[in-house]
Amino acid sequence: MSDFFISRPIFAWVLAIMVMLVGALSFLVLPVAQFPEIASPQVVVSARYPGASAQTIDASVTQIIEQQIRGVDNLLYMASESDSTGTTSITFTFENGTNVDIAQMQVQNKLQLAMSMLPDAVQRQGINVTKSSAGILLIMGLTSSAGMSDQDLGDYLVSNLQDPLSRISGVGQLTSPSSQYAIRIWCDPVLMAQYKLNPTDVVQAIRQQNNQSTGGQTGAYPIMTGQEINFTVNAASRLNTTEDFGNIILKTDADGSMLRLHQVARVTLQGERFSTLLKVNGAPSGAIVFGLAPGANALETAKEVKATMAQLARFFPEGMEYIFTYDSTKFIEVSIWQVYKTLGEAIVLVCLVMFLFLQSFRATLIPTIAIPVVLLGTCALLTAAGYTINTLTMFGIVLAIGLLVDDAIIVVENVERLMLREGLSPMEASRKTMHQISGALVGVAMVIASVFVPMAFMPGSVGILYRQFSVTIVSAMGLSALVALILSPALCATLLRPHHTSQ
């Protein structure tokens, strides 16, 4: 194989350039993260039962859902949490390597079997099934210097910002602990008892009278001869103000007298919930938490979120501002930059050491050319394997820098030796060199692979950590051996100059 490329150095160059081009394109699309995804895939089912205690929602909602979610592929275990605010969250954890999209679909299908057994209030609220986020990416706070309350800020955030932000590519689970405005009805127990009413009567009256009704049409087909008018009847729509809710009729007597809601209760417009209190620098605030979707590029996603917020901020009311109180990409940028810096320093040191010992610019150039070819080729293999640029993969590349030039150095040194001692031309020395050391190059690559390959088969989270490191090292060494067998001898035959010895 080496003889073929020694005779055709242009073909060897073309292959090397193609590898570098593919690697460069792969490097541009590789996701960037601080660490690989270690946690097992998870699907979260959340539901709300307004007014229910933790024990009630656990017995009537959580246990029913857990009993129905059986037989899902690769399910390891489930964990649930029910609180006194009427909220339950059930987390289903799957084996590593499970396709989380398929797992979510299977959980949703199983959940349909439990819907009919859940309380009506839970069914009306709806059940949310989401993929667990890969981690918190950003936390954004919304403040106002114009005296807006936390309910004002939370209502603006949920109504105007949440939807466009959730559509950004790379944003996974997006949650807001802020409270929206809601109509709250405070029933007077004395008046309720006086009129022989209970809260269920109030709830039923609100459901009946706060709905969207269809009025039909007048003059619709079939019509009488000469009919010329056809119009749609607009019936009463949903209630919007506290006065509208206060005028809800609870009872009607035979004499035509009516008991309205405002006569037995106080109707106010307040926050939907009071379980959270959000402040930024001591001022009322709204907040939104961005979760990173599995496999997404953290840096690109955060950049897109910030660009979108800059556009949305142009339509803010006077005095409203936003601030990112937590940004995980800063840690990622610093850690990855330090690894890039170490990688550059390693390349410079390797080149200096090679020039110091080889004492020839041409001889130093040949192993130096192998470095970008192997590094970019490794990026292409990482993309094919579905990995990311993270601390572990970059650490593997840094360690491989010193190893990957060894093969090319061996080729150059042996070619120089044959030209000096036997007076061979660069092409003849390159051919003889490859006949002598090809087996050694392959043997060295296999020995190093035998050390690191077993690490890729370790199970669990530890296996995920070591697998990316192992694949990076083995890929770099394999490409290094190929470059030493294909490109390095072709470069030696064309770049090196023969030694003129005196007779």
Image (tube, rainbow, N blue to C red):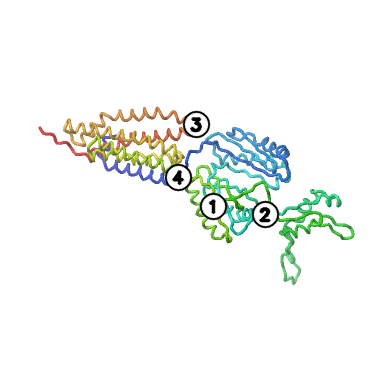
| Residue at mark 2 to residue at mark 1: CA–CA distance | 22 Å
- Label 3's element? helix
Q: Work out which quarter of the rendered image holds the N terminus and state it.
A: top left
* Front position in the image: 161 or 62: 161
Q: Residue at x 38, y 37 (%)?
A: 398
Give the numbered dot on residue 100: none
Numbered disc in front, either 2 or 3: 2
* Front position in the image: 390 or 231: 390
Give the numbered dot on residue 323: 1
Q: Earlier in the sequence, mark 3 or mark 1?
A: 1
Q: Earlier in the sequence, mark 2 or mark 3?
A: 2
Crowd rating for badge 4 (residues with CA inside 10 Å; few <14, some 14–19, many 20+) = some
Pointers 4 and 3 in contact (C-beta within 8 Å): no
Identified by mark 4, the residue type is Glu
Give the numbered dot on residue 181: 2
User: Badge 4 is on which residue?
Assistant: 333
Crowd rating for badge 3 (residues with CA inside 10 Å; few <14, some 14–19, many 20+) = few
- Label 2's element? strand
Count all numbered tags in the image, as a single digit.
Answer: 4
Percent position of residue 406, x then y: 31, 33
Q: Residue at x 62, y 39 (%)?
A: 107
Q: Earlier in the sequence, mark 4 or mark 2?
A: 2
| Residue at mark 3 to residue at mark 1: CA–CA distance | 37 Å
Identified by mark 1, the residue type is Ile
Q: Earlier in the sequence, mark 1 or mark 4?
A: 1
| Residue at mark 4 to residue at mark 3: CA–CA distance | 24 Å
Q: Earlier in the sequence, mark 2 or mark 1?
A: 2
Q: Residue at x 61, y 33 (%)?
A: 77
Whether residue 371 is situated above or below residue 198 in the rendered picture = above
Give the numbered dot on residue 462: 3
Q: Work out which quarter of the rendered image holds the C terminus and state it.
A: top left
